[in-house]
């Protein structure tokens, strides 16, 4: 299954998004970022939380169509490898 991130992921909606995804763990194995346009480093927190929850279940998260800015943020924060970016 695939979970698509919304266009915007910021501090304003990150907690709600994290909760929504956590209720649908099976859908979180593949994260589609093709709609993601307006975001800050909060998106990394959400993705890392989902990754942690999936690892407990013996699965991992795959991020697809990551925008360049997301890859740069992940690199700056040193979490690129954790998210497969």
Image (cartoon, rainbow, N blue to C red):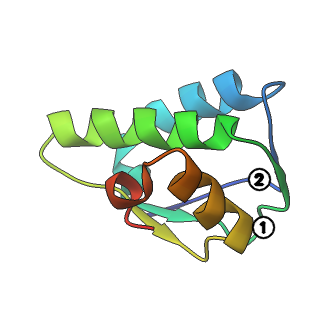
Q: Is residue 25 above or below residue 19?
A: below
Which residue position is annotated with label 2?
6
Give the label on residue 35, or none. 1
Q: Is residue 9 above or below residue 5?
A: above
Residue drawn at x 53%, y 44% is 77
Q: Nearer the viewer, residue 17 or 73?
A: 73
Using a 10 Å C-alpha cutoff, classify the residue at mark 1 as few (fewer than 14 neighbours), some (14 to 19) or many (20 or more). some
Residue drawn at x 57%, y 30% is 18
Would you say 82 lies left or right of 39 here?
left
Residue drawn at x 45%, y 68% is 85
Residue drawn at x 43%, y 39% is 48
Residue 68: give x, y in percent of width and height: 69, 73
Residue 16: give x, y in percent of width and height: 68, 25
Residue 45: give x, y in percent of width and height: 55, 33
Quadrant of image for the N terminus: bottom left
| Residue 49 found in image quarter | top left
Q: Earlier in the sequence, mark 1 or mark 2?
A: 2
Would you say 32 lies left or right of 53 here?
right
Tag 1–tag 2 contact (CB < 8 Å): yes
The total of numbered circles placed on residues is 2
Residue 40: give x, y in percent of width and height: 77, 43
| Residue 69 found in image quarter | bottom right
């Amino acid at each position: 299954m695939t979970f698509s991130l919304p266009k915007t992921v910021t501090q304003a909606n990150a907690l709600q998004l994290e909760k929504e995804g956590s209720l649908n763990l099976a859908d979180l194995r593949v994260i589609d970022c093709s709609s993601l346009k307006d975001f800050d480093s909060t998106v990394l927190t959400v993705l890392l939380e989902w990754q942690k929850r999936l690892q407990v279940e013996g699965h991992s998260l795959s991020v697809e169509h990551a925008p360049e800015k997301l890859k740069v943020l992940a690199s700056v924060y040193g979490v690129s490898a954790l998210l497969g970016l």
